[in-house]
Amino acid sequence: KAGVTQTPRYLIKTRGQQVTLSCSPISGHRSVSWYQQTPGQGLQFLFEYFSETQRNKGNFPGRFSGRQFSNSRSEMNVSTLELGDSALYLCASSLERLQETQYFGPGTRLLVL
Amino acid sequence: ELKVEQNPLFLSMQEGKNYTIYCNYSTTSDRLYWYRQDPGKSLESLFVLLSNGAVKQEGRLMASLDTKARLSTLHITAAVHDLSATYFCAVARYNNNDMRFGAGTRLTVKP
């Protein structure tokens, strides 16, 4: 089985721009969750999608949004980028729920200048 | 507010020795996770613990959960160099849409 894929792998943007990151889960997995990792704040949970619905959401401003498509692929969007949004963004998929084993993608490294 | 504390933050071990990483959290939770991260790499899910007294083992790693003490441990048995990585615990409360990570324990296993 192919693993979780994330595109793009690296991205450079400037402040004020917006960005969309994509995550394709393992075939058959319906839950996709997103995480942000920075040196200062560490790992933080962004949100989880299941069957095209946001099921859980972490404590992030409204600039961070996401969606999930009928094929379970998910996108994450960050609008009006700030320097502090520079981070490694990870997505993970699981069969049904977050209490199952999650499989992580390689991450998208975003640099905001 | 849900807080998660991991200790130690840095751990240097000799091969063949045993050690334990601790994960304390501040309020009741629905589930507890352990992850591994190699330098410059993504996360790897190790264990998901759902109930009090849960114990899971994979190779030289064993995780346990005591919900009354709000404590989870990750025990390393007879460490080998390949276990060198950063280990994170995370605690989730989904009724409150809350999931918090520990700061991570950077483990180095020396020959």
Image: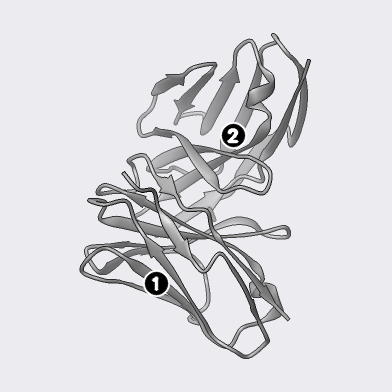
| Extreme residue in the front direction | A2
Name the kind of residue labelled 1 in the image. Glu
- Tell me if A93 is positioned left or right of B77 in this view: left
In this orientation, which residue lies closer to the viewer: A49 or B2? A49
The residue pinned by badge 2 equals: B23
Point 66% across, 15% down: residue = B79
Mark 2: secondary structure: strand
Q: Same subunit under labels 2 and 1?
A: no
Point 41% across, 50% down: residue = B93
The answer to whether residue B96 shows anywhere in this view is no
The residue pinned by badge 1 equals: A75
Q: Assign the N terminus of chain B to one quadrant of the image.
A: bottom right
Point 46% across, 62% down: residue = A6
Point 43% across, 77% down: residue = A65
Q: Position of residue A32 (x, y in %)?
A: 35, 58
Mark 1 burial class by Cα count in 10 Å: few <14, some 14-19, many 20+: many
Compared with B35, B13 (above or below) is: above
Q: Position of residue A78 (x, y in %)?
A: 52, 79
Q: Quadrant of residue B4?
A: top right
- Tell me if B36 is positioned left or right of A75 in this view: right
Q: Position of residue A9 (x, y in %)?
A: 56, 64
Q: Are marks 2 and 1 in contact (CB under 8 Å)?
A: no
Distance Cα–Cα, label 2 vs label 1:
32 Å
Using the image, name the chain to which the residue with label 2 belongs: B
